[in-house]
Amino acid sequence: MDPQTTLRSGLPDRYLTPNDVAAMFGVPLETVYQWRKKRTGPPGFRIGKHLRYDPVDVRAYVTERQHAEADAA
């Protein structure tokens, strides 16, 4: 993850690329694309041909997953 993706108060200062999301979660880039295809990961959106992720949506996804794990335990 490059220095510009440094988290401040838990959120980056810009929209995230698929590479950013892969680095944040420590998963292969292909996993991020599979999540999008299967609609199981954080929601992304297109700006022209470029896929981007809103850091607020990524944080909400993480929170949702944490609650799902807690409820399953």
Image: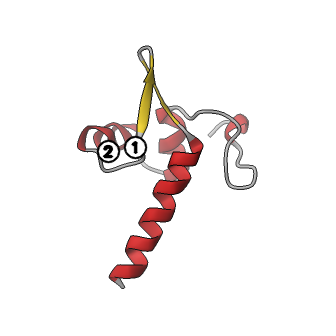
| SS at badge 2 | helix
Please tell me which residue is depicted at 42% across the width and 80% down the height of the picture. Answer: 70
Hey, which quadrant is residue 72 in on the image?
A: bottom left
Position above or below: 68 against 71: above
**Disc 1 crowd, CA 10 A, few/some/many (<14, 14-19, 20+):** few
Residue 65, placed above or below residue 36: below
Name the amino acid, label 2.
Trp
Q: Residues within 10 Å of mark 2 (few under 14, many from 20)?
A: some
Q: Which residue has dot 1 on it?
A: 28
Q: Can you say whether 28 is above or below 9 in the image?
A: above
Q: Residue at point 49% right, 52% down?
A: 25
- Identity of the amino acid at label 1? Pro
Which callout, 2 or 1, points at the residue further toward the start of the chain? 1
Q: Do the residues labelled 2 and 1 touch (CB within 8 Å)?
A: no
Residue 41 sits above or below residue 3 on the image: below
Q: Residue at x 42, y 47 (%)?
A: 42
Name the residue beneath numbered marker 2. 35
